[in-house]
Amino acid sequence: MGKHIRAVSNNPELCKLYGIDSDKVILMATVVSSALAAIAGILIALDVDMTPTFGFNYFLYGVVAMIIGGVGSYRGLIFGSLLLASAQHLAAYYIDTKWIDAVAYMILILFLIWKPLGFSGLRLKKIDI
């Protein structure tokens, strides 16, 4: 199975010529990697006492950084993340750590009001159906 995975990753069209079903190989690789990740996640959760909402705040910070940076812009995402992290840490240093979330959402609201397209300023293309 490992040789099939390497072959499909290099050239899926050539694998079809040799009779290797590339869709089946991709599905099996996904199933195996997901199962291993699930087992690792369960074992880590048992060790560090995780809860179902463990990473939700980090997810929200990621969404805020994406909105600040602009959708579809890697450079904007980096600058948005740096701005958000810097503002949060400066607020924790100068004000109090309780204000970290409030600062993040105030920055989000300010960007949505004055610069809704983020740092990049690129509009997404409209698709007419």
Image: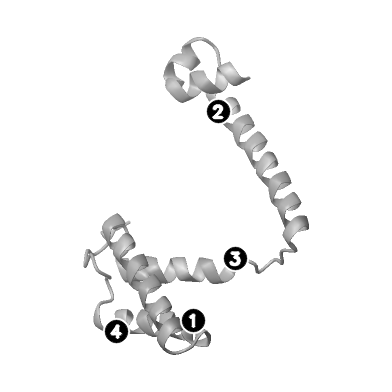
Q: Position of residue 87 (x, y in %)?
A: 37, 78
Q: CA distance from mark 4 to mark 3?
A: 28 Å
Q: CA distance from mark 4 to mark 2?
A: 46 Å
Is the C-beta separation of discs 1 and 2 under 8 Å? no
72 or 52, nearer to the observer:
52
The residue where tag 1 is placed is 101
Q: Secondary structure at mark 2?
A: helix
Q: Secondary structure at mark 1?
A: helix
18 or 68, nearer to the observer:
68
**In front: label 3 or label 2:** 3
Q: State the residue lying farthest toward the right.
A: 46
Q: State the residue lying farthest toward the front.
A: 93
> Which residue is at a point 64% across and 67% down the rendered structure image?
54
**Disc with the residue nearer the chain's start (4 vs 3):** 3
Q: Quadrant of the N terminus?
A: top right
Q: Residue 113 — which label? A: 4
Q: Amino acid at mark 3?
A: Gly
